[in-house]
Image (cartoon, rainbow, N blue to C red):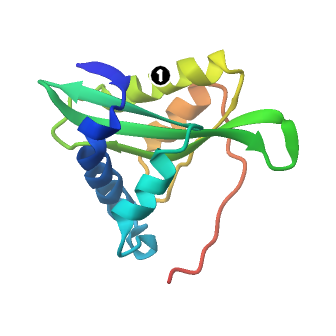
Amino acid sequence: MIIREADLEKDALAIAEGAKAFAEKMALGAFISDDFVGALSKIVTLSSVKIYIAEHDGRPVGGLGVNFAPYMWNHDLLIADELFWWVDEAAPFKTAVMLFNQAMIEIDEKEAVPMFRALEASGKGVKKMYKKHGMRPMETLYARVP
């Protein structure tokens, strides 16, 4: 398995399907637009967005998207805000960790502050991995589901 930067022409369908399936699995389905692909394409084409793809046996089996931007209350801080992170159920066990580690390499190189989510449906391993990388919980988000 390899982790590489996304090629939007080649990977767009896998990114869209993976991000949508992940959102639905994580109970975010109510927030998905009828034009999900159009909405997603506006974000992933921004120059501040970096997408990593896990490829196994010649096909994408996972993806992680990060947006690099100044923090809203302190523009001297660059944040790396997770946009999506999906892994195919048939992907090798280490796929999620490999995607996260690759993203963290670039985040550290850019001296950015990583901001990743752990949703109610996230496994315990996600929180453990975040803590291993020096991250800690910062907030709990409450939302009225449409």
In the image, what residue occupies the spot 35% across and 22% down? 4
* 51 left or right of 79 in image: left
Q: Can you give x and y, in whole percent of width and height, for residue 114 in the image?
A: 64, 34
Dot 1: element:
helix
Q: Can you give x and y, in whole percent of width and height, for residue 137 in the image?
A: 67, 45
Q: Nearer the viewer, residue 45 or 113?
A: 45
* Quarter of the image where one finds residue 29: bottom left
The reply to whether residue 121 is visible in this rendering is: no
Q: How many marks?
A: 1
* 103 left or right of 91 in image: right
Q: Is residue 98 above or below residue 36?
A: above
- Quadrant assignment for the N terminus: top left
Amino acid type, mark 1: Asn
Q: Can you give x and y, in whole percent of width and height, for residue 25 in the image?
A: 33, 60
* Neighbourhood count class around disc 1 (C-alpha, 10 Å): few under 14, some 14–19, many 20 upward: some
Q: Which residue is mark 1?
A: 101
In the image, what residue occupies the spot 60% across and 31% down? 131
Q: Residue furthest bottom?
A: 146
